[in-house]
């Protein structure tokens, strides 16, 4: 029973800290641009999980590709790719994208859809 409570405590800590860490990555310029694009492309709420996964993968690839494309470094995989810390960061980034894309999509459906409907009635 002690092992179960230890694992539950670790999982709860991950979610608590993961949201904070995920928001830190998504709140940067790169993260917000990716979130805006994916929120704009999202058609309905059922696809939020897949859209957030796509945004996360795009973010992880962009972090590798941007220095290479800017001629500031060579193309190489992250040095900690096989470590648990990298995948925890990726999972936290995913949680951050779920929330940010959901908020942006809610704003999109609230404001952009009404503007189009009001224009169609005139």
Image: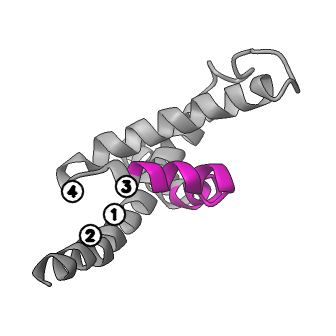
Asked whether disc 3 touches disc 1, contact meaning CB atoms under 8 Å apart, the reply is no
Tell me, for residue 109, which label it has, or none: 2
Q: Is residue 9 visible?
A: no
Is 86 located above or below residue 79 in the figure?
Answer: below
Q: Are the residues tagged 2 and 1 within 8 Å (C-beta)?
A: yes
Q: Mark 3 Cα within 10 Å, few/some/many (few <14, many 20+)?
A: some
Magenta segment includes 35: yes
In the rendered image, which residue does mark 4 sit on? 45
Asked if the residue under mark 1 is in contact with the one under mark 4, i.e. CB atoms within 8 Å, the reply is yes
Residue topped by disc 3? 40
Q: Position of residue 44 (x, y in %)?
A: 19, 55
Which residue has dot 1 on it?
A: 105
Q: Which SS type dominates the magenta stretch?
A: helix
Q: Which residue range is magenta in the image? A: 19-38
Q: How many marks?
A: 4
Question: Which numbered disc, 4 or 1, marks the residue that appears first in the sequence?
Answer: 4
The residue positioned 34% from the left and 48% from the top of the image is 41
Closest to the camera, between mark 4 and mark 2, is 2
Q: SS at mark 3? A: helix
Quadrant of the image occupied by residue 88: top right
Viewport quadrant of the N terminus:
top left
């Amino acid at each position: 029973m002690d092992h179960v409570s230890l694992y539950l405590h670790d999982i709860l800590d991950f979610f608590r800290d993961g949201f904070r860490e995920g928001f830190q990555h998504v709140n940067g310029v790169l993260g917000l641009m990716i979130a805006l694009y994916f929120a704009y492309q999202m058609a309905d709420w059922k696809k939020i999980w897949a859209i957030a996964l796509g945004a996360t993968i795009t973010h992880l690839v962009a972090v590798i590709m941007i220095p290479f494309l800017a001629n500031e470094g060579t193309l190489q995989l992250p040095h900690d790719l096989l470590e648990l810390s990298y995948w925890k960061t990726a999972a936290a980034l995913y949680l951050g994208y779920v929330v940010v894309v959901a908020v942006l999509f809610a704003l999109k459906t609230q404001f952009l859809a009404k503007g189009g409907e009001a224009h169609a009635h005139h």
